[in-house]
Amino acid sequence: GQNIDQPTEMTATEGAIVQINCTYQTSGFNGLFWYQQHAGEAPTFLSYNVLDGLEEKGRFSSFLSRSKGYSYLLLKELQMKDSASYLCAVMDSNYQLIWGAGTKLIIKP
Amino acid sequence: IAGITQAPTSQILAAGRRMTLRCTQDMRHNAMYWYRQDLGLGLRLIHYSNTAGTTGKGEVPDGYSVSRANTDDFPLTLASAVPSQTSVYFCASSPRGGGTEAFFGQGTRLTVV
């Protein structure tokens, strides 16, 4: 079966750095997405990786290793507004998104 | 309308009733999707449409139907609601089916009692 694993919850301190991991087993691979979802709101797009390596976008970076079935989202200089759930999703061979359950990130002052 | 809009934003529905959740986008995106999101689970795809006039079944299609008469609208119908369909429903669209980001509506919180 297809499976996306990410930690259920993480806690970090304002101003610090946090890394949210995602491992996947899917039938085929056509890219990996990270989305941010604040409580009670819709998911919003953060990043897309289809090749191995690191993609940097401001305070957020996303890394992919296809051979290991692994990705991480790195958040730097954490702000209180970064408190949200972070969703990892993989596009399979049928171009359908398979979603992880999300990682709830709690930022403490 | 800007982006993707869902209606209603929330609804309490008696079991056995028929309900249509509406979704409209003004971005001229080809692909549209319906997901449900339940606590502790990832978003699960109910139905999708890669282009107007075509639809397909996702991971959890039973009890739901969709239509795609035009590019902008993608309604989701529950023919006879059951309590297990209590969930938050998100409609999403993307320019094409693969490799592009999806834009989400604000969600419909549905409670079936």
Image (cartoon, helix red, strand yellow):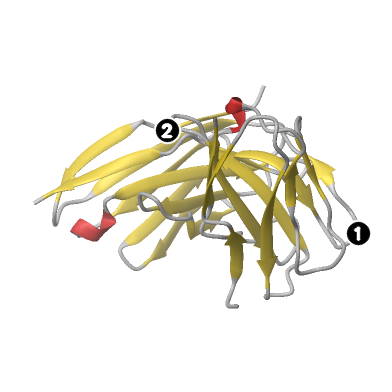
Residue A24 lies in what quarter of the image?
top right
Query: Given the image, on which type of amino acid does mark 2 rest?
Result: Gln
Q: Is residue B56 above or below residue B16?
A: below
Residue at image point 30% right, 34% down: A9
> Quick one: label 1, few (<14), some, or many (20+) residues within 10 Å?
few
Q: Which structural element holds mark 1?
A: loop
Q: Position of residue B36 (x, y in %)?
A: 59, 40
Residue B43 visible? The answer is no
Residue A27 visible? The answer is yes
Looking at the image, which residue sits at the far top?
A1
Q: Is residue A5 above or below residue A98?
A: above
Residue at image point 70% right, 39% down: B46
Residue in the foreground of this view, choosing between B52 and B79: B79
Q: Where does the N terminus of chain A fall, quadrant-wise?
A: top right
Q: Which residue is mark 2?
A: A6
> Which chain is disc 1 placed on?
B
> Which chain is disc 2 placed on?
A
Q: Which residue is mark 1?
A: B53
Q: Seen in the image, is A77 located left or right of residue B2?
A: left
Query: Given the image, on which type of amino acid does mark 1 rest?
Result: Gly
Q: Which structural element holds mark 2?
A: loop
> Quick one: label 2, few (<14), some, or many (20+) residues within 10 Å?
many
Q: How many marks?
A: 2
Numbered badge on residue A36: none
Residue at image point 84% right, 58% down: B68
Q: Position of residue A108 (x, y in %)?
A: 12, 47
Q: Position of residue A32 (x, y in %)?
A: 57, 47
